[in-house]
Image: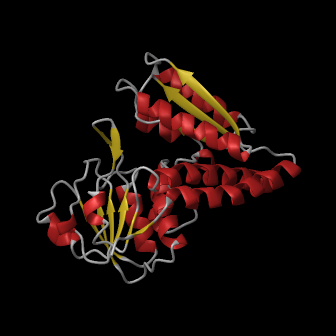
């Protein structure tokens, strides 16, 4: 029996409805949520992501400004743009689109964003709060993946969860979120020995390594929940880190690529931006 699809299109559309109502409520209080995106260079994938973020802002009534800076932008100019957005009370969320050109120091740039405006959840303070289980802005992709599990009513507490990948953007925060939900979590990576031995134990398997169709059916436990975070392009077509066609025959639930976690990533960025605007409004 084929797996049940965890459909990011449907889930993100439902979330956007709720967020639109929150935006309208904020506007009645005289506040329009504002998101500033800083895009340096002409990376095609980044251009696409930023375009999708702009469209989501338009749908929800969020004011969106994209600062498009040339590839040759110097660190000082990037940092000045961040500081300007920090100082602007109409800007509730700031996002520096990654990856930045190699000559720029992304870690230092991200550290300059005010933690309360860090809607990507990458600031050291937000990451630190996440490790302590405190209220914080959570990185959009792992937050979206967790939302999908919860929305589908999938039990997490007491389950064996395996995360493949240890990036600061997805793997590590995903493991922390699952741990907070009382899963028993294993993090696997490029140095893990006998990877399939770990993945076959997983009740919940999260693949976030950026290798197309890397997770095959023989690596998956019968009836597992499979969350595919990968976005890869092979022969002009998008695919995930999971061999979807084979694994869907073995898993109980699976996310598609495209139309899965990627959709939730944008929705969670909107959610973080609206939440930041609400907190700013309550402080005013």
**Residue 125 visible in the current orientation:** no
Instruction: Say left or right for 70 vs 66.
Output: left
Give whichever of 81, 128 is nearer the camera: 81
Task: Identify which residue, 88 or 269, lies in the foreground.
Answer: 269
Q: How many badges with numbers are in the image?
A: 0
The picture places residue 77, in percent across and down from the top left corner, at: 53, 21
Task: Report whether 272 appears left or right of 235.
Answer: right
Left/right placement of residue 113 relative to residue 187 reads right
Locate residue 128, reporting x and y percent.
46, 58
What residue is shown at x 61% (from left), y 53% (from top)? Answer: 272
Up the image or down, 144 lies above or below 159; here it is above
Q: Which residue is found at the position 81% from the left and 52% from the top?
A: 24
Q: Is residue 251 visible?
A: yes
What's the residue at 26%, 48% (across, down)? Answer: 212
Residue at image position (87%, 46%) is 30
**Quadrant of the image occupied by residue 83:** top right
* Quadrant of the rendering where the N terminus is positioned: bottom left
């Amino acid at each position: 029996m084929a797996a049940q699809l965890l459909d990011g299109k449907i889930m993100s559309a439902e979330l956007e409805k709720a967020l639109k109502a929150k935006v309208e409520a904020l506007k009645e209080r005289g506040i329009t949520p504002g998101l500033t995106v800083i895009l340096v260079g002409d990376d095609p994938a980044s251009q696409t992501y930023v375009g999708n973020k702009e469209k989501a802002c338009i749908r929800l009534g969020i004011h969106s400004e994209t600062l498009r800076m040339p590839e040759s932008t110097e660190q000082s100019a990037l940092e000045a743009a961040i500081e300007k957005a920090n100082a602007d009370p109409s800007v509730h969320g700031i996002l520096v689109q990654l990856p930045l050109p190699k000559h720029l120091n992304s870690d230092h740039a991200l550290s300059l964003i005010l933690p309360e405006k860090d809607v990507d959840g990458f600031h050291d303070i937000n990451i630190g709060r996440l490790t302590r289980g405190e209220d914080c802005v959570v990185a959009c992709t792992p937050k979206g993946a967790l939302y999908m599990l919860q929305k589908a009513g999938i039990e997490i507490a007491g389950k064996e969860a395996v995360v493949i990948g240890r990036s600061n953007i997805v793997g590590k925060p995903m493991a922390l979120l699952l741990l907070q939900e009382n899963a028993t979590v294993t993090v696997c990576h490029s140095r893990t020995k006998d990877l399939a031995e770990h993945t076959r134990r997983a009740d919940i398997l999260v693949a976030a390594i950026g290798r197309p169709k890397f997770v095959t059916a023989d690596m998956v436990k019968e009836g597992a929940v499979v969350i595919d975070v990968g976005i890869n392009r092979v022969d002009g077509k998008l695919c995930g880190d999971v061999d979807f066609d084979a694994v869907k025959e073995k898993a109980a639930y699976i996310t598609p690529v495209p139309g899965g976690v990627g959709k939730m990533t944008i929705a969670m960025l909107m959610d973080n931006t609206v939440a930041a605007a609400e907190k700013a409004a309550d402080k005013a």
